Image (cartoon, grey):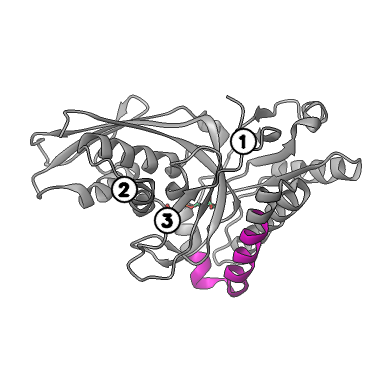
């Protein structure tokens, strides 16, 4: 193997969400999902094998800071690295940097585990194909399976218990007019992690029963809408899918409410704009921020309505 392995991967935003696992160890989802990657926002990672450290622990640093071995982030990374140790004496040093403003609420495990898998592939010179890379990234974090590709991507739910049919693939469609607007809303509360949140939902939310079927129907609708470049159908379905996911979160006990007053305010603004004929939709993940979906023609209207929106064009770079 080489002395250092390097990898980088983008953040992705699900248009049709992953929420709930049929296997919590292998991160096997109860439904398929589709996403779009954000160019220029993501994670860069380096990994190397190190000789024994004093507590026999990996060294994990994040954005230039060496983490305590007990820090949740470091523990989760070490746990994932257990899959890749040749023997129990192998230790890794992982240096990871997010090119995502933390306030944007995008600093996700998705780009992190995708970048780490690419760095391991580079270190060990495996030259794995996309499918295998996606399977491995999924073991770190479900949504990471979709972060290996630019543009649109689809994560197949799979049905096997070994998870070997649960991986993501790139969707080749290019859609130059497609825009994403990031609305940053202040986080005041300590958020519930996706991992914990979806598990509580699966265990305590009666409404969740309806989720897998709707999610898979929405996924199919969104895949067709991407293929046909039918923006209205894509936007409507993505917004409805996100709100349905949040409905299951709210109906969980203890309740999971990621929304802040400003999130709800922004939703109303989106609905008002639509009434005025501006075609814009939103989606939201496990946090208070809205991600706006619109086409290039609506850029001026969006900039005017949302003063601090950060606009990204995933197919132009
Ligand atoms: C709301 O992939 O972070 O962003 O598999 O436990 O690491 P783990 O969960 P994670 O969940 C992402 C949830 C979501 C929706 C999505 O990205 O599809």
Residue drawn at 57 percent across, 69 percent down: 212
Q: CA distance from mark 2 to mark 3?
A: 21 Å
Residue at x 91% of width, y 40% of height: 276
Q: Is residue 283 something that shows in the picture?
A: yes
The residue where tag 1 is placed is: 186
> Is 172 colored magenta in this rendering?
no
- Judge from the rendering whether residue 115 lies leftward or rightward of residue 227; answer left or right: left
* Callout 2–callout 1 Cβ contact below 8 Å: no
Q: x and y percent of residue 89 in the render?
A: 8, 45
Name which residue lies at 74% across and 38% down.
294
Question: What secondary structure is found at the residue carrying circle 2?
Answer: helix
* Disc ID at residue 167: 3
Magenta residues, dominant SS class = helix
Queried on whether the Cβ of the residue with tag 3 lies below 8 angstroms from ligand 1, the answer reads: no
Q: Is residue 209 magenta?
A: yes
Residue for badge 2: 76
Nearer mark to the viewer, of 3 and 1: 3
| Real-space CA distance between mark 3 and mark 1, rounded to the nearest whole angstrom | 33 Å
Disc number lying in front (2 or 3): 3
Highlighted range, magenta: 200-222
Is 148 positioned to the left or the right of 206 in the image? Answer: left
Q: Is residue 294 left or right of residue 220?
A: right
Quadrant including the C terminus? top right
Residue 262: which quarter of the image?
top right
């Amino acid at each position: 193997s080489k002395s250092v392995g390097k990898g980088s991967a983008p953040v992705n935003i699900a248009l049709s969400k992953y929420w709930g696992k049929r296997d919590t160890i292998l991160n096997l989802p109860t439904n398929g999902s589709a996403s779009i990657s954000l160019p220029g926002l993501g994670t860069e990672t380096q990994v190397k094998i190190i000789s024994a450290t004093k507590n026999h622990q990996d060294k994990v640093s994040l954005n230039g800071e060496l983490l305590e071995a007990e820090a949740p982030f470091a523990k989760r990374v070490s746990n994932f690295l257990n899959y890749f140790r040749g023997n129990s004496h192998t230790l890794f040093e992982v240096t990871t940097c997010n090119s995502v403003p933390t306030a944007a609420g995008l600093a996700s495990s998705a780009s992190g585990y995708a970048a780490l898998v690419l760095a391991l592939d580079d270190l060990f010179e495996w030259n794995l194909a996309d499918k295998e890379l996606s399977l491995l990234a999924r073991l770190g974090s479900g949504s990471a399976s979709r972060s290996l590709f630019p543009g649109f991507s689809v994560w197949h739910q799979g049905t096997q218990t070994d998870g070997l049919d649960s991986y993501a693939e790139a969707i080749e469609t290019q859609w130059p007019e497609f825009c994403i607007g990031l609305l940053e809303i202040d986080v005041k509360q300590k958020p519930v992690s996706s991992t914990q949140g979806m598990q509580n939902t699966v265990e305590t939310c009666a409404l969740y029963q309806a989720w897998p079927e709707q999610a898979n129907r929405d996924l199919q609708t969104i895949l067709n809408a991407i293929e046909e470049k039918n923006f209205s159908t894509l936007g409507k379905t993505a917004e409805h899918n996100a709100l349905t996911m949040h409905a299951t979160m709210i109906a969980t006990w203890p309740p999971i409410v990621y929304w802040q007053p400003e999130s709800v305010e922004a939703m109303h603004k989106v609905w008002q704009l639509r009434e005025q004929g501006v075609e814009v939709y939103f989606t939201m993940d496990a946090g208070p921020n809205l991600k706006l979906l619109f086409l290039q023609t609506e850029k001026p209207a969006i900039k005017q309505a949302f003063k601090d929106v950060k606009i990204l064009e995933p197919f132009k770079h």
